[in-house]
Amino acid sequence: MDIGKTRKNYKSKNGIFNNKRSPLLFFKEWYKEAEKKVSEPNAFALSTSNKNKTSSRMMLLKDFSNTFTFYTNTSSKKGRDILSNKAASMLFWWKELEQQIRIEGTLSKLSTYKVKKYFYSRPKDSQIAALSSNQSSQLESYNHLIEEFDTNKKKYSKKRVPFPKDWVGFELKPQMIEFWQGGPNRLHQRIEYKKIKGIWEAKILAP
Ligand SMILES: Cc1cc2nc3c(=O)[nH]c(=O)nc-3n(C[C@H](O)[C@H](O)[C@H](O)COP(=O)(O)O)c2cc1C
């Protein structure tokens, strides 16, 4: 299928280069705007790699300040990747704002205290779903998963759901953050921040 003619023109004329502040504040500013206009602004693609093989999947960002936090399962492909390679990248695409943000850095595990605190703040059915799913393992059938969920739902209807042993949280400490704003005639605006000897340095890049 030839889709070469699919073409969207970007329009934004808002300048992004007068920003010499920390990219973390810049991210917060854009995020607040995205919360108003984007349906799931916390959705991002996480790329991990292991032995020269890279893979990406969508994730949900759950917290950010100086680092960027998400939750997952160590039994998964990404879990195994991260175990052997702490380098990762996050990618946000906020279509409604014609904005892309790329973040690269290294991951570290959150404390069990923080992870449990978040786990038990989730709706009980989500806790039960996490307990019932050994993420990325092969299933005999989809029904098998539903049965496991129903069994656990009954079992823990009046009890606290046990904490799933492979459930983890990671925070990414950024070393590079790039902001991209779509513009007319493909003349998009890009600004890249790199942390060099503890200081964020900014560069404007050609689109
Ligand atoms: C919008 C969206 C958000 C998601 N958020 C998460 C998440 O926060 N954590 C997670 O483990 N998986 C999340 N997933 C599922 C992952 O994309 C993926 O299927 C799963 O983590 C297994 O990936 P892996 O086998 O590459 O490790 C999300 C999927 C979508 C589409």
Image (cartoon, grey):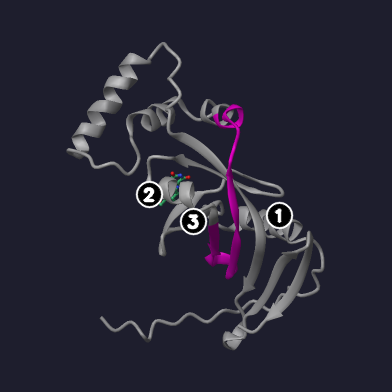
Residue 16 vertical placement versus 43 (above, below): below
Q: Amino acid at mark 1?
A: Lys
Residue marked by disc 3: 46
Q: Bin the neighbour count of mark 1 within 10 Å (Cα to Cα): few under 14, some 14-19, many 20 and up.
A: few
Nearer to us in this view, 193 or 101: 193
Label 2 and label 1: CA atoms lie apart by: 30 Å
From the image, state whether disc 3 or disc 1 is nearer to you: 3
State yes or no: discs 2 and 3 in contact (Cβ < 8 Å): no
Q: Are marks 2 and 1 in contact (CB under 8 Å)?
A: no
Q: Secondary structure at mark 1?
A: helix
Q: Which mark is residue 137?
A: none
Residue at horizontal 33 percent and vertical 21 percent from the top: 153
At 76% across and 72% down in the image, what residue appears? 202
Q: Nearer the viewer, residue 151 or 54?
A: 54
Q: Looking at the image, which residue is at 37% across and 49% down?
A: 77
Residue under pointer 2 = 77
Amino acid type, label 2: Lys
Instruction: Establish if 114 lies above or below 176.
Output: above
Name which of mark 3 and mark 1 comes first in the sequence. 1
Q: Quadrant of the N terminus?
A: bottom left
Beta carbon of the mark 2 residue lies under 8 A of ligand 1: yes
Find out if the beta carbon at label 3 lies less than 8 Å from the nearest ligand 1 atom: yes
The residue segment tinted magenta is 88-115
Q: Which residue is mark 1?
A: 28
